[in-house]
Image: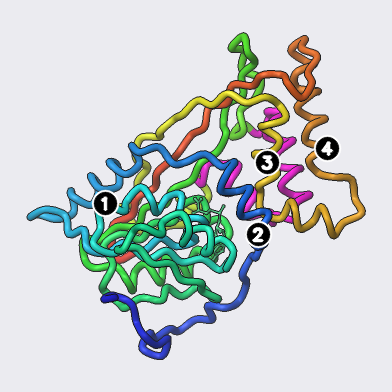
């Protein structure tokens, strides 16, 4: 397949790309659960990304090659399979890549590759879109941008996606939590849960401030947020906790640690939040959750470097 180097030696790098890899998404059980319980990305994201690409090219967007970094089971990759001649998804987790290969096995233009460092296994100046969906908070941002700068063609873009179950409402519509509000009990409970699952401070910060801290660190002046996409989901408390059980690190630490199960603590916090609204909750209590999908776009034009 064109656009992929056959040997790592043909890519030149200055910095150490192997310094820290967070391997929280390993294991067949977790990857299966992740695939089942995490929501799919809304189709509108595809339109936004393609529209941004189109605006950079004068004579119709070049849609030859997309790279999905940290692709997991391919939930974001699959939005674009009809749009690009070739797509490569990369991930440090062999189990996630196995799920992705299975999910997209009928797509001849898509390939998946396990990587073991922060380098992108593709040639310089070959990629039209680097996609990174809900994965950048685990990566070294400087190395990610350095690699984007290297592999993108002029006019190409980086599309950084993220999602969070932002607003919690009761079945009567009362708002009882906002994950991005530092004073919200929901924010505090999830922060504690992430910490108990071993997520480091920087990653927690990125996730709990809707990637604003990632946005701030990008020096490229073309960076911008496209309009958020929002999707409502209805869960029982039990189902919503299962969603949180797919967080990287949860399963790993649950079986290794003798500390109380972080998910039990999270459940207790949710019950307390409900109690404050006068609702005695149990596993079947209904929650309305608004997921938000921020889309951060950066153009290759002018370079992407962080400094
Ligand atoms: C939360 S999952 C998101 C997966 C997928 N993009 C999605 O949206 O469903 C984060 C993924 O990033 C991968 N990952 C973490 N660090 C990585 C790195 N340095 N390079 C490539 N993948 C990485 C993990 O293995 C995991 O599959």
Question: How packed is label 2: few (under 14 Cα within 10 Å), some, or many (20 or more)?
Answer: some
Labelled disc at residue 82: 1
In this rendering, the label closer to the viewer, 4 or 2: 2
Question: The magenta stretch spans which residues?
Answer: 182-211
> For residue 238: magenta?
no
Circle 2 is placed at which residue position? Answer: 28
Mark 3 or mark 2: whose residue is earlier in sequence: 2
Q: Secondary structure at mark 1?
A: loop
Distance Cα–Cα, label 1 vs label 3 = 31 Å
Q: Residue at x 51, y 74 (%)?
A: 115
Q: Secondary structure at mark 2?
A: helix
Give coordinates of residue 187: x percent, y percent.
Answer: 67, 34
Give coordinates of residue 184: x percent, y percent.
Answer: 68, 28
Circle 4 is placed at which residue position? Answer: 264
Mark 3 or mark 4: whose residue is earlier in sequence: 3
Q: Residue at x 46, y 49 (%)?
A: 75
Mark 4 or mark 2: whose residue is earlier in sequence: 2
Give coordinates of residue 158: x percent, y percent.
Answer: 35, 57
Circle 3 is placed at which residue position? Answer: 244
In the image, residue 44 above or below residue 194: above
> For residue 197: magenta?
yes
């Amino acid at each position: 397949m064109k656009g992929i180097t056959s040997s790592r030696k043909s890519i030149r790098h200055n910095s150490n790309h192997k310094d820290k890899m967070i391997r929280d998404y390993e294991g067949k059980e977790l990857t299966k659960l992740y695939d089942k319980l995490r929501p799919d990305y809304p189709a509108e994201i595809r339109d936004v990304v393609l529209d941004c690409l189109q605006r950079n090219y004068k004579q119709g967007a070049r849609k030859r090659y997309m790279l999905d970094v940290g692709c997991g089971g391919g939930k974001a990759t699959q939005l674009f399979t009809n749009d690009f001649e070739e797509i490569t998804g990369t991930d440090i987790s062999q189990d996630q890549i196995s799920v992705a290969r299975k999910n997209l096995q009928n797509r001849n233009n898509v390939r998946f590759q396990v990587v073991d460092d922060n380098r992108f296994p593709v040639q310089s100046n070959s990629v039209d879109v680097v996609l990174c969906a809900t994965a950048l908070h685990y990566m070294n941002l400087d190395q990610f941008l350095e690699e984007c700068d290297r592999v993108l063609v002029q006019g190409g873009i980086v599309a950084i996606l993220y999602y969070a179950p932002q607003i919690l409402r009761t079945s009567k519509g009362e708002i009882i939590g906002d994950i991005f509000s530092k004073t919200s009990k929901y924010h505090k409970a999830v922060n504690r849960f992430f910490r108990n699952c071993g997520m480091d401070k920087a990653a927690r910060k990125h996730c709990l401030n809707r990637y604003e801290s990632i946005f701030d660190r990008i020096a490229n002046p073309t960076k911008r947020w496209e309009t958020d996409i929002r999707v409502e989901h209805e869960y029982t408390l039990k189902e919503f906790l299962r969603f949180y059980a797919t967080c990287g690190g949860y399963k790993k630490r649950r079986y290794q640690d003798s500390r109380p199960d972080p998910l039990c603590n999270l459940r207790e916090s949710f019950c307390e939040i409900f109690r404050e609204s006068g609702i005695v909750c149990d596993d079947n209590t209904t929650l309305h959750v608004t997921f938000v999908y921020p889309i951060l776009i950066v153009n290759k034009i002018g370079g992407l470097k962080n400094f």
